[in-house]
Amino acid sequence: MTADATPFERLGGEAAVRALVDAFYDRMDVDEAYAGIRALHPPALDRSRDKLNWYLCGWLGGPQHYVERFGHPRLRARHLPYAIGTAERDQWLACMRAALGDAEVEPVLAASLMGAFDGTADWMRNRDG
Ligand code: HEM
């Protein structure tokens, strides 16, 4: 692995991103702590898994699967139908932190990914409280 490896490469490529996304939605589906954001999602999570997987591959510096399928992510606009305040932001981040542990992502990489997720999740807030 070269020093300028992308986060996508450091994580372990496509299979590792998918494993992280599956850990994230598996957690959200069973852990009461994330019931608030689980309720915002459709009953079946297959499509949500695919979309987050495709998005994260590109966001981490790998293949642009999401953009190829849907164009520019416009992520904040796409979240406007869902009421996202600090509680939802914090649940999403806590669920992702747990998923990074479940997927056994190396701690230094996990911490740096959490730093990046922090900003993105905060930017998704669309209501007070
Ligand atoms: C801040 C708290 C967040 C909440 C409560 C939330 C919730 C949701 C919900 C309910 C959906 C719709 C799922 C579906 O249609 O199956 C969604 C879609 C999505 N979310 Fe989030 N999300 C949050 C943050 C994030 C963050 C930080 C990212 C990326 C790092 C992200 C990436 C995505 C993507 C790529 C989609 C699919 C968009 C589409 O094409 O329709 N979300 N999110």
Image (spheres, grey):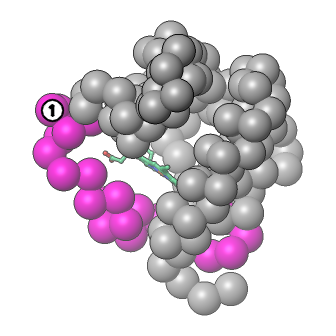
Name the residue: 62% across, 76% down: 85
| In magenta stretch: residue 79 | yes
Say few, some or many: other residues with alpha carbon within 10 Å of mark 1 (under 14 / 14 to 19 / 20 or more): few
Q: What amino acid does circle 1 point to?
A: Glu
* Left-right relation of 33 to 66: right
Q: Quadrant of the C terminus?
A: bottom right
Name the residue: 46% across, 31% down: 4
| In magenta stretch: residue 69 | yes
> Which x, y percent locates residue 23?
68, 25
Name the residue: 73% across, 32% down: 100
Q: Is residue 62 above or below residue 123?
A: above
> Which x, y percent locates residue 92?
67, 53
Name which quarter of the figure residue 61 lies in. Answer: top left
Disc 1: which residue: 68
Name the residue: 20% across, 39% down: 67
> Which x, y percent locates residue 40?
56, 54
Residue 91 seen in this snapshot: yes
Identify the magenta region.
Answer: 66-88
Q: Secondary structure at mark 1?
A: helix
> Which x, y percent locates residue 27?
75, 32
* Left-right relation of 13 to 25: left
Q: Is residue 97 above or below residue 88?
A: above
Question: Can you tell me whether the CB of the residue at mark 1 lies under 8 Å from the nearest atom of ligand 1?
Answer: no
